[in-house]
Amino acid sequence: MSSTAHDADLTRLGARVGVLKVHWSDRVGHAILILAAVALAYFLLLPLAAILVKSVQDKAGEFIGLANFTEYFRTPALARSIWNSVWVSALVTAITIPLAFTFAYALTRSCMRFKVLFRNVALVPILAPSLLAAISFIFWFGNQGLLKGLLMGGQIYGAGGIVISMVFATFPHALMILVTALSLTDARLYEAADALGTRAARKFWTITVPGAKYGLISAAMVVFTYALSDFGIPKVIGGNFNMLATDIFKLVIGMQDFSKGAVVAIILLVPVAVTYVVDHWVQKRQSALLSARSVPYVPRPSRGFDWAMTGYCVLIGALLLAVLGMAVYGSFVKLWPYNLSISLDHYKMGLVEAGIFDAYVNSVTLGAWCALFGAVFIFGVAYLLEKTRGLDAFRPFVRLMAVLPMGVPGMVLGLGYIFFFVREANPLHFLYGSMAILVINTIVHYYTSSHLTALTALKQIDAEFESVSASLKVPFWRTFFRVTVPVCLPSMLDVSRYLFVNAMTTVSAVVFLYSPKTMLASVAIVNLDEAGDIGAAAAMATLIVATSALVCVAYYFLQVWLEGRTQRWRG
Amino acid sequence: MGEFLELTGIRKEFGDFAALKGVSLGVRQGELLCFLGPSGCGKTTLLRIVAGLEVQTAGTIMQAGRDISRLPPMERDYGIVFQSYALFPNLSVADNVAYGLVNRKMARPQRDARVAELLQLVGLPDAGRKYPSMLSGGQQQRIAIARALATSPGLLLLDEPLSALDARVRVRLRGEIRNLQQRVGITTILVTHDQEEALSMADRIVVMKEGEIEQIGTPEEVYTRPATPFVADFVGKTNLLPAAPAGSDGVQVGPQRFACTVNGAAGEGKLRLFFRPEDVVVRGVDGATANSAAATVEKVEFLGAFSRITFRLAGIEQPLTADLSLNDMAEFHPKPGDTLRIAVPADRMRVFAA
C-alpha cells in the first residue's frame, strides 16, 4: 500500500471516530444557539471590553497603560471605597441569607397557615426600587425621623442605613432562590432517614442543607453582588459613606472622568471571576435532584415547630411591611414632619404637574417588553443549552455568558453600554437613547437569575425526553413546545414576572442610558431625592410598588388558572 | 454475516478510561439479546452507542445491511425504553403512545386504531385517557413499551426496564415483555444486571465485564458451560476451588482428587475447579462412587423449594455449598455437625486456568 493511500485511509478513519452526522433538525437548534450566543456576546462581552479599553486611555483617547489605575490607588478617598463596598456587602449577605433561609424553610417545610400570604408579604420588597427602603428609613430614622431618638444621637445616614436598607432589598431575592432549592427535595430521602430513626437536626444537616446547597451558594452570590453593585441605596441614605457604585456615578456623571469611571468599574468587576468559578464548581456537583419517579415532599404538622415558624414569619413580615408602609405613608403626608395631614399633593403637583409622569409610563413599557421577550429568549437558550446535543466545545462559552451577568454590577453594564454604543462607528449606534437599548440592557442585567430558574426547572424534567423523541423521529422543537414548555410554564411565568418587576425597579444600569424621551420612574426617584423633594420621590416609589403588585396579582391568577388546568396530569 | 445488527470493534473512551475495549457481536433477526454484567461493565454505554446517544471512539455498527455508525438517533431505526420510563407527564397515555405517529402524518382514525391496538397489546386497553401519574410503575413501563413499538421500529432497546419495579411486578412483567417480543417478533436488546432476568427472558446472553465480552451464548450454555470463572460466578450460585493439575482426566484440590474433563485448561500452573450447588449428589452415594467424599455439615439454610447446605471437605479450607431437594432433606435430614457422603458427577465439573 502506498503511503498516500494509507494516509487517505487514516483520514477516513479519523472522520469516523467520535463524531456523528448531525441531523438537519439539530442544525436548526445549533443555528439558534449560535445566534443567541452572538447576541449575548454583542450585548454583554463587547460593552465590557469597551470598559477595558477606556480604562487604559486618557481623556483624549490615547493609550496610557495603567496610569489611570496608579492614579486611582493614589487617591485614598477612592481606594477606601473598595473596602467599604466589600465589608458592607459581606455583612448584608451574612444577615440576609440566614433570615431568608429560615423564612424559606417555614414556607416549604412547615404546616403553618397563611403560607401564601407570608410568601407574598416577604416578596414585597422586590416590588419596590431599592431606593424605597432608603427613603423609608429616612422617614423612620432620618434627621426628622419618627424614631430618631432610638439611635441615641447616632445617624442613619452612612453604613448602618445602607446595610439595613440592603437587607430589606435583598431579602426576597435570596428567598426566591432558597424556596426553589428547598422545594426540590425528594420525600423518599426523608422517609429513608425516618426509617433509620434519624433525629430532626441530623436530617436537617444531612439532607436539607446538602439538597439546598446549590441554592444557598447561588443566593449568597446574588445578595453579595446585589449589595456590591446597588447604586440607589448608598446614593440616598449613604451620606458621606462612599462605595464603588456611587463613585462611578460621581466620576462619570459628576466629573465626566470616563477613564477613572472605567477603572472603578473594572475593580467592581473582580467578583465576576469568583462568581463564575464558584458557580462552575457547584454545578459540576449538582445532578438532577428530582427524577421522574421522585416523590414530592409533603410536610407533616408539628404544633411547636409550626407555631415557631408562624411567629418568625409574622415578625419578619411585620418589619417588611413597616418599611414599605412608611414610604407609602410619607408619599401622602402634606409636609413631613410639620404638616402630617393626608393629601395627594405629591402625586398631583410633584409628579403629574411637574411632567415626570411620562417616566412612569416608560417604566411600564420597559417592563412589558422585558417580561415577554426576555422570558422567551432566556428560557429558549437555557433549553438549547441543557437539552440538545452537539456543539460541545461551544457550550461552555455560552454557559459562561449566561452566568456572567450575575457578577456584572448594573453600574458597570450601563457604563459599558455608553462606551460601546455611543460610538457612531457601532452598527447598532441607532439604539443609543432608545427604549430598545433599555430593554436589552435590562434583560442582560437580570439574565443570570432568570437563567438559573429556567435551568432548575429544566433539570427537574426527565433527561431522556429528548432521546425518546429522537428515537421516535420527532424533532426536538415539537417536544419543546408540546412537553417542555407546558411542564415548565410555571417557572417561565416566574421568570417573566421577575423581569417585569426588575425592569420597573432597576436604577443602576439604566441611570446611564436613559434619554429625555425614555426617562424611567426609578431614575426619577433619584433625581427627586437629589432635588430634596422626598415626598414626590416617595410618591413615585409608591406608584412603582403598586404597579408591580398589581402585575404580580395578575400573574398569580394566571398561575392559579394554570394549576387548575394542569392538575389532572400533575396527579 | 447475515446478522440483523452487527457491531464490530466498538471502543469507547472517556478520557483515559476505556469503557468499551473493542466489542464485536451480532444480533440475529427477531431474537432477544441480553447484555448482562455488573454495573460499570459498559453494557449501558454499548446500548446507548447502538441508539446513537453516545458516540463510539472507534468501531462500526451495521443494522439491516446499513452502516449506521455515524447516523444521528433521528436517522436510526429503533424504539427505546428507559428505566425511568420517560413518559411525557402532561400528555395522556394515548397521546404518549401516539407521539411518534403524529409526526408521520398518519390520518387520525388510523392513528387512533394503532394506539388502541398497542394498548391492547400491552394489556392496558382502557388506559388511553389517563395520565401517566395515575398509573402504577409497571403500567407506566408497559405504556413506554407501547410508545416505543408504535412506529414499528426494526429494533427495540430496553435499558434496565424492570429495575425500578418491585419484585412481583418485575417477575410478571418479565414474562409479559418476553411474550410481547415474541408475538411482535421484534429484534430486541435488553440491558440488565439481573442474571435471573437475563436467563428467563433472553434467546442469547452477552456477559460483559470491564468493557469486554466474557461469553456469548444461550441462557443454558452460559449457565451450564460458563466460559470463564467470572461468568460462572456472576450467573447463578457457584463453588469455585483453587486446584492443581492431576493428569489428563482430573484435578487435585488439597488431599482430594476429582476426576473430570480438563479440556484446554489442562497444563501447568494453577487451575480453578467449578461446580454448582445443585450438582452435588447425596442419594445413592457410597465409598465407591466417583468423586465422592465425606462432608462435614456446617450450616443448613431452608430456602423453600430446596435447602442450601454449607459444608467442608477434609483438608480443604474453603467452605462449599450444596442445594438439596426437599426429598433429599427428608431422607438424610442433615444437621450442623453431621457427616454426609457427597459426590459431584464428573460431567458437571469444569476446570479453568486460574
Image (cartoon, rainbow, N blue to C red):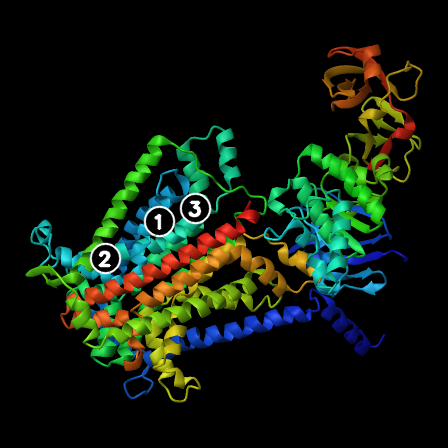
Residue topped by disc 2: A165
- Residue A175 spot, x, y in % from top left: 36, 51
Q: Numbered disc 3: what chain?
A: A
Other residues around mark 1 within 10 Å, as few (<14) / some (14–19) / many (≥20): many
Camera-nearest residue between A242 and A174: A174
Choose the circle earlier in sequence order: 1 or 3: 1
Residue A392 is left or right of residue A439, and the answer is right
Q: Is residue A441 visible?
A: yes
Q: Amino acid at mark 2?
A: Ser
Residue B236's quadrant in the figure?
A: top right
Q: Which residue matches tag 3?
A: A182
Q: How many marks?
A: 3
Amino acid type, label 1: Arg
Image vertical order of residue A330 relative to residue B214, above or below: below
Q: Nearer the viewer, residue A11 or A120?
A: A120
Q: Nearer the viewer, mark 1 or mark 3?
A: 1
Q: Secondary structure at mark 1?
A: helix
Q: Amino acid at mark 3?
A: Leu
Q: Which residue is mark 1?
A: A119
Quadrant in which the C terminus of chain B appears: top right
